[in-house]
Protein backbone atom coordinates (compact mmCIF):
# COMPACT_ATOMS: atom_id res chain seq x y z
CA UNK A 1 0.00 0.00 0.00
CA UNK A 2 1.19 3.59 -0.53
CA UNK A 3 3.05 4.99 2.51
CA UNK A 4 0.68 7.97 2.59
CA UNK A 5 -1.99 5.75 4.14
CA UNK A 6 0.19 3.96 6.70
CA UNK A 7 -0.54 6.26 9.65
CA UNK A 8 -4.28 5.60 9.25
CA UNK A 9 -3.82 1.89 8.59
CA UNK A 10 -1.62 1.48 11.67
CA UNK A 11 -3.98 3.48 13.89
CA UNK A 12 -6.92 1.35 12.76
CA UNK A 13 -5.06 -1.91 13.42
CA UNK A 14 -3.95 -0.84 16.89
CA UNK A 15 -7.48 0.36 17.71
CA UNK A 16 -8.54 -3.22 16.92
CA UNK A 17 -5.78 -4.45 19.28
CA UNK A 18 -3.80 -6.18 16.55
CA UNK A 19 -0.08 -6.90 16.44
CA UNK A 20 1.28 -5.18 13.33
CA UNK A 21 4.07 -5.59 10.82
CA UNK A 22 4.37 -2.16 9.22
CA UNK A 23 6.41 -1.43 6.11
CA UNK A 24 8.77 1.46 5.64
CA UNK A 25 8.45 4.41 5.51
CA UNK A 26 5.69 4.87 8.06
CA UNK A 27 4.71 8.33 6.79
CA UNK A 28 5.39 10.84 4.02
CA UNK A 29 5.24 14.01 6.12
CA UNK A 30 5.91 15.12 9.69
CA UNK A 31 2.19 15.17 10.49
CA UNK A 32 1.92 11.50 9.60
CA UNK A 33 5.08 10.65 11.54
CA UNK A 34 3.66 12.28 14.67
CA UNK A 35 0.48 10.24 14.26
CA UNK A 36 2.48 7.01 14.01
CA UNK A 37 4.48 7.97 17.09
CA UNK A 38 1.26 8.37 19.09
CA UNK A 39 -0.11 5.09 17.75
CA UNK A 40 3.07 3.25 18.73
CA UNK A 41 2.81 4.64 22.26
CA UNK A 42 -0.73 3.28 22.42
CA UNK A 43 0.42 -0.10 21.08
CA UNK A 44 3.07 -0.31 23.80
CA UNK A 45 0.46 0.39 26.47
CA UNK A 46 -1.72 -2.39 25.02
CA UNK A 47 1.17 -4.86 24.89
CA UNK A 48 1.12 -5.13 21.09
CA UNK A 49 4.09 -5.91 18.86
CA UNK A 50 5.02 -3.31 16.25
CA UNK A 51 7.63 -4.73 13.88
CA UNK A 52 9.12 -2.49 11.20
CA UNK A 53 9.90 -3.36 7.60
CA UNK A 54 13.32 -1.73 8.01
CA UNK A 55 14.63 -5.20 7.34
CA UNK A 56 18.37 -4.68 7.73
CA UNK A 57 17.74 -4.51 11.48
CA UNK A 58 16.92 -8.21 11.21
CA UNK A 59 19.98 -9.21 9.16
CA UNK A 60 22.30 -11.18 11.45
CA UNK A 61 25.49 -10.09 9.68
CA UNK A 62 24.52 -6.43 9.80
CA UNK A 63 23.57 -6.73 13.46
CA UNK A 64 26.95 -8.14 14.43
CA UNK A 65 28.89 -5.72 12.23
CA UNK A 66 27.14 -2.70 13.72
CA UNK A 67 27.50 -4.07 17.24
CA UNK A 68 31.27 -4.44 16.76
CA UNK A 69 31.51 -0.91 15.36
CA UNK A 70 29.57 0.41 18.35
CA UNK A 71 31.88 -1.56 20.65
CA UNK A 72 34.86 0.36 19.25
CA UNK A 73 36.28 -1.90 16.53
CA UNK A 74 37.18 1.15 14.40
CA UNK A 75 37.46 3.65 17.24
CA UNK A 76 35.15 6.65 17.29
CA UNK A 77 32.96 7.16 14.23
CA UNK A 78 34.06 10.24 12.30
CA UNK A 79 31.91 10.04 9.16
CA UNK A 80 29.59 7.71 7.27
CA UNK A 81 29.18 7.39 3.51
CA UNK A 82 25.68 6.06 2.90
CA UNK A 83 24.48 4.99 -0.55
CA UNK A 84 21.33 3.52 -2.02
CA UNK A 85 22.10 3.83 -5.71
CA UNK A 86 20.01 1.55 -7.89
CA UNK A 87 17.94 1.35 -11.04
CA UNK A 88 14.41 2.26 -12.02
CA UNK A 89 11.30 0.53 -10.72
CA UNK A 90 7.88 -0.45 -12.06
CA UNK A 91 5.28 1.72 -13.75
CA UNK A 92 1.67 0.54 -14.13
CA UNK A 93 0.89 2.48 -17.29
CA UNK A 94 -2.37 4.35 -17.90
CA UNK A 95 -5.90 3.56 -19.09
CA UNK A 96 -8.52 5.87 -20.64
CA UNK A 97 -11.08 5.10 -17.94
CA UNK A 98 -8.76 5.94 -15.03
CA UNK A 99 -9.32 9.26 -13.30
CA UNK A 100 -6.15 11.16 -12.46
CA UNK A 101 -6.60 10.14 -8.81
CA UNK A 102 -6.70 6.48 -9.81
CA UNK A 103 -3.67 6.96 -12.05
CA UNK A 104 -1.69 8.52 -9.21
CA UNK A 105 -2.62 5.80 -6.72
CA UNK A 106 -1.83 2.99 -9.17
CA UNK A 107 1.51 4.67 -9.93
CA UNK A 108 2.06 5.82 -6.37
CA UNK A 109 5.86 5.49 -6.49
CA UNK A 110 6.00 8.64 -8.58
CA UNK A 111 4.03 11.01 -6.36
CA UNK A 112 5.58 12.51 -3.26
CA UNK A 113 2.26 12.70 -1.42
CA UNK A 114 1.87 8.94 -1.81
CA UNK A 115 5.44 7.59 -1.59
CA UNK A 116 7.53 10.26 0.12
CA UNK A 117 9.84 10.27 -2.95
CA UNK A 118 12.69 7.79 -3.40
CA UNK A 119 14.60 9.08 -0.38
CA UNK A 120 11.72 7.98 1.83
CA UNK A 121 10.12 5.09 -0.02
CA UNK A 122 13.32 3.15 -0.71
CA UNK A 123 16.46 4.85 0.58
CA UNK A 124 15.10 5.19 4.13
CA UNK A 125 16.78 1.78 4.58
CA UNK A 126 20.18 3.47 4.28
CA UNK A 127 19.28 6.41 6.50
CA UNK A 128 18.00 3.94 9.07
CA UNK A 129 21.36 2.16 9.15
CA UNK A 130 23.22 5.44 9.61
CA UNK A 131 20.95 6.38 12.51
CA UNK A 132 21.40 2.90 14.01
CA UNK A 133 25.19 3.25 13.80
CA UNK A 134 24.91 6.52 15.73
CA UNK A 135 22.72 5.13 18.51
CA UNK A 136 19.45 6.10 16.80
CA UNK A 137 20.23 9.76 17.26
CA UNK A 138 18.49 12.44 15.22
CA UNK A 139 20.55 14.82 13.06
CA UNK A 140 20.79 18.47 13.97
CA UNK A 141 20.41 19.70 10.40
CA UNK A 142 20.58 18.72 6.75
CA UNK A 143 21.56 20.29 3.44
CA UNK A 144 20.86 18.60 0.12
CA UNK A 145 20.27 18.66 -3.59
CA UNK A 146 18.90 16.46 -6.35
CA UNK A 147 16.52 16.41 -9.26
CA UNK A 148 15.24 14.35 -12.20
CA UNK A 149 17.47 13.58 -15.16
CA UNK A 150 15.96 10.34 -16.52
CA UNK A 151 12.43 10.76 -15.17
CA UNK A 152 11.55 13.76 -17.30
CA UNK A 153 8.36 12.26 -18.79
CA UNK A 154 5.21 13.62 -17.08
CA UNK A 155 4.10 10.02 -16.47
CA UNK A 156 6.64 9.94 -13.65
CA UNK A 157 4.67 12.38 -11.54
CA UNK A 158 6.67 14.75 -9.37
CA UNK A 159 9.33 12.62 -7.69
CA UNK A 160 13.05 13.01 -8.32
CA UNK A 161 15.43 10.29 -9.46
CA UNK A 162 18.47 11.27 -7.38
CA UNK A 163 19.34 12.94 -4.07
CA UNK A 164 22.54 13.92 -2.27
CA UNK A 165 22.16 15.04 1.34
CA UNK A 166 24.64 16.00 4.05
CA UNK A 167 23.49 15.37 7.63
CA UNK A 168 25.15 16.71 10.77
CA UNK A 169 24.75 14.77 14.03
CA UNK A 170 25.05 16.17 17.56
CA UNK A 171 27.80 13.72 18.58
CA UNK A 172 30.07 15.05 15.83
CA UNK A 173 29.98 12.59 12.90
CA UNK A 174 28.70 13.65 9.51
CA UNK A 175 26.67 11.51 7.12
CA UNK A 176 27.20 11.90 3.38
CA UNK A 177 24.20 10.30 1.72
CA UNK A 178 23.29 9.62 -1.92
CA UNK A 179 20.46 7.74 -3.58
CA UNK A 180 19.32 7.35 -7.14
CA UNK A 181 16.99 5.32 -9.34
CA UNK A 182 18.57 5.57 -12.79
CA UNK A 183 19.17 2.83 -15.35
CA UNK A 184 22.55 2.38 -17.01
CA UNK A 185 24.45 3.52 -13.90
CA UNK A 186 26.67 1.61 -11.48
CA UNK A 187 24.61 0.30 -8.56
CA UNK A 188 25.97 0.55 -5.03
CA UNK A 189 24.19 0.03 -1.73
CA UNK A 190 26.18 0.08 1.51
CA UNK A 191 27.41 2.18 4.41
CA UNK A 192 31.15 2.89 4.63
CA UNK A 193 31.91 3.89 8.20
CA UNK A 194 35.10 5.86 8.89
CA UNK A 195 36.53 5.74 12.40
CA UNK A 196 39.60 6.97 14.24
CA UNK A 197 41.10 3.45 14.10
CA UNK A 198 39.86 2.08 10.79
CA UNK A 199 36.80 1.73 8.63
CA UNK A 200 33.98 -0.73 8.00
CA UNK A 201 31.49 -1.71 5.31
CA UNK A 202 28.18 -2.59 6.88
CA UNK A 203 26.44 -4.65 4.18
CA UNK A 204 29.72 -6.34 3.23
CA UNK A 205 30.00 -7.36 6.92
CA UNK A 206 33.67 -6.32 6.98
CA UNK A 207 35.77 -4.32 9.42
CA UNK A 208 39.19 -2.95 8.53
CA UNK A 209 40.48 -1.86 11.92
CA UNK A 210 43.48 -2.72 14.05
CA UNK A 211 42.23 -6.27 13.49
CA UNK A 212 40.47 -7.25 10.27
CA UNK A 213 37.14 -9.02 10.70
CA UNK A 214 34.50 -10.54 8.47
CA UNK A 215 31.17 -11.99 9.51
CA UNK A 216 31.06 -15.73 8.84
CA UNK A 217 27.98 -16.71 10.82
CA UNK A 218 24.57 -17.90 9.62
CA UNK A 219 22.83 -15.81 6.97
CA UNK A 220 19.10 -16.50 7.06
CA UNK A 221 16.87 -14.24 4.98
CA UNK A 222 16.31 -10.98 6.82
CA UNK A 223 12.77 -10.91 5.42
CA UNK A 224 12.07 -14.28 6.97
CA UNK A 225 13.89 -13.43 10.19
CA UNK A 226 11.86 -10.29 10.86
CA UNK A 227 8.69 -12.36 10.67
CA UNK A 228 10.14 -15.23 12.71
CA UNK A 229 10.94 -12.78 15.51
CA UNK A 230 7.57 -11.05 15.08
CA UNK A 231 5.58 -14.29 15.42
CA UNK A 232 7.74 -15.47 18.32
CA UNK A 233 7.10 -12.22 20.20
CA UNK A 234 3.36 -12.83 19.87
CA UNK A 235 3.54 -16.47 20.96
CA UNK A 236 5.81 -15.66 23.92
CA UNK A 237 3.82 -12.63 25.04
CA UNK A 238 6.95 -10.46 24.81
CA UNK A 239 6.05 -7.61 22.44
CA UNK A 240 8.61 -6.10 20.08
CA UNK A 241 8.45 -2.32 19.84
CA UNK A 242 10.26 -0.94 16.79
CA UNK A 243 8.20 2.25 16.94
CA UNK A 244 10.84 4.73 18.08
CA UNK A 245 13.45 3.95 15.47
CA UNK A 246 11.06 3.53 12.54
CA UNK A 247 9.54 6.95 13.27
CA UNK A 248 12.96 8.57 13.74
CA UNK A 249 14.34 7.12 10.50
CA UNK A 250 11.22 8.15 8.58
CA UNK A 251 11.61 11.68 9.92
CA UNK A 252 15.27 11.73 8.87
CA UNK A 253 14.24 10.86 5.31
CA UNK A 254 11.58 13.58 5.35
CA UNK A 255 14.14 16.09 6.65
CA UNK A 256 16.50 15.17 3.81
CA UNK A 257 13.77 15.52 1.21
CA UNK A 258 12.62 18.87 2.57
CA UNK A 259 16.18 20.21 2.62
CA UNK A 260 16.88 19.03 -0.93
CA UNK A 261 13.56 20.24 -2.34
CA UNK A 262 14.03 23.68 -0.80
CA UNK A 263 17.74 24.00 -1.49
CA UNK A 264 18.19 25.36 2.02
CA UNK A 265 19.91 24.14 5.16
CA UNK A 266 17.12 22.86 7.41
CA UNK A 267 17.30 22.35 11.17
CA UNK A 268 15.78 19.23 12.72
CA UNK A 269 13.51 21.24 15.03
CA UNK A 270 12.18 23.32 12.13
CA UNK A 271 11.43 20.19 10.11
CA UNK A 272 9.63 18.55 13.04
CA UNK A 273 7.45 21.64 13.42
CA UNK A 274 6.32 21.53 9.78
CA UNK A 275 2.52 21.16 9.71
CA UNK A 276 2.23 20.41 5.99
CA UNK A 277 0.01 17.42 5.28
CA UNK A 278 0.74 16.03 1.83
CA UNK A 279 -2.18 14.90 -0.29
CA UNK A 280 -5.77 15.94 -1.01
CA UNK A 281 -8.22 16.99 1.67
CA UNK A 282 -10.55 14.20 0.59
CA UNK A 283 -10.16 11.12 -1.56
CA UNK A 284 -12.33 10.98 -4.67
CA UNK A 285 -11.93 9.16 -7.98
CA UNK A 286 -11.73 12.48 -9.78
CA UNK A 287 -9.37 14.36 -12.05
CA UNK A 288 -7.22 15.88 -9.33
CA UNK A 289 -4.46 18.37 -10.19
CA UNK A 290 -1.00 17.13 -11.10
CA UNK A 291 1.46 17.94 -8.27
CA UNK A 292 4.34 20.23 -9.19
CA UNK A 293 7.95 19.04 -9.32
CA UNK A 294 10.10 20.70 -6.67
CA UNK A 295 12.69 23.16 -7.99
CA UNK A 296 15.25 24.17 -5.32
CA UNK A 297 15.21 27.86 -4.56
CA UNK A 298 11.94 28.33 -6.45
CA UNK A 299 9.30 25.99 -5.03
CA UNK A 300 7.07 23.11 -5.96
CA UNK A 301 6.50 19.97 -3.90
CA UNK A 302 6.88 19.95 -0.11
Image: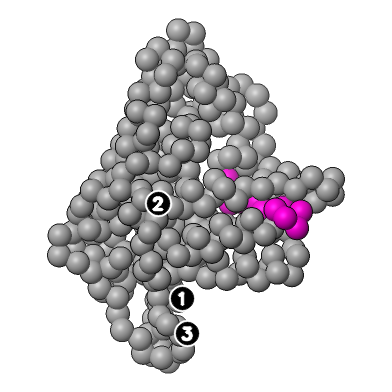
Residue for badge 2: 253
Which residue is depicted at the point 48% across and 68% down?
4
> How busy is the neighbourhood of tag 2: few (under 14 within 10 Å), some, or many (20 plus)?
many
Q: Quadrant of the C terminus?
A: bottom left
Residue 218: percent from left, percent from top: 67, 28
- Residue nearest the observer in this picture, 153 or 9: 9
Q: Which mark is residue 77?
A: none
Residue 291 visible in the shown view: yes
Q: Is residue 290 above or below residue 164?
A: below
Image x and y of residue 43, in percent:
69, 58
Direction from residue 69 to residue 117 in the image, left or right = left
Mark 3 or 1, which is nearer the eye? 3
User: Cα distance, mark 3 to mark 2?
Assistant: 25 Å
Q: Which stretch is magenta? A: 44-55
Residue 36: x and y in percent read 56, 60
Left or right, residue 202 beside residue 36: left
For marks 3 and 2, the one nearer the N-term is 2
Q: Which residue is mark 1?
A: 106
Q: Which residue is mark 3?
A: 283
Amino acid sequence: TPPHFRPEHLAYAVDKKKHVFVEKPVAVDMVGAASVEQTCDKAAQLGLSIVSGLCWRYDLGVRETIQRIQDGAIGDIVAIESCYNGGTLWHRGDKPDWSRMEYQIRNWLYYTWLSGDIIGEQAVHSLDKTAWLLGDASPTRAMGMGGRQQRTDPKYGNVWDHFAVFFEYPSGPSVYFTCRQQDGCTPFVDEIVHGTKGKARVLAHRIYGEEKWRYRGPKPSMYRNEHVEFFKSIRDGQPIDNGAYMVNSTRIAILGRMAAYSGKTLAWEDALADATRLGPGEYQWANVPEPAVAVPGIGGAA
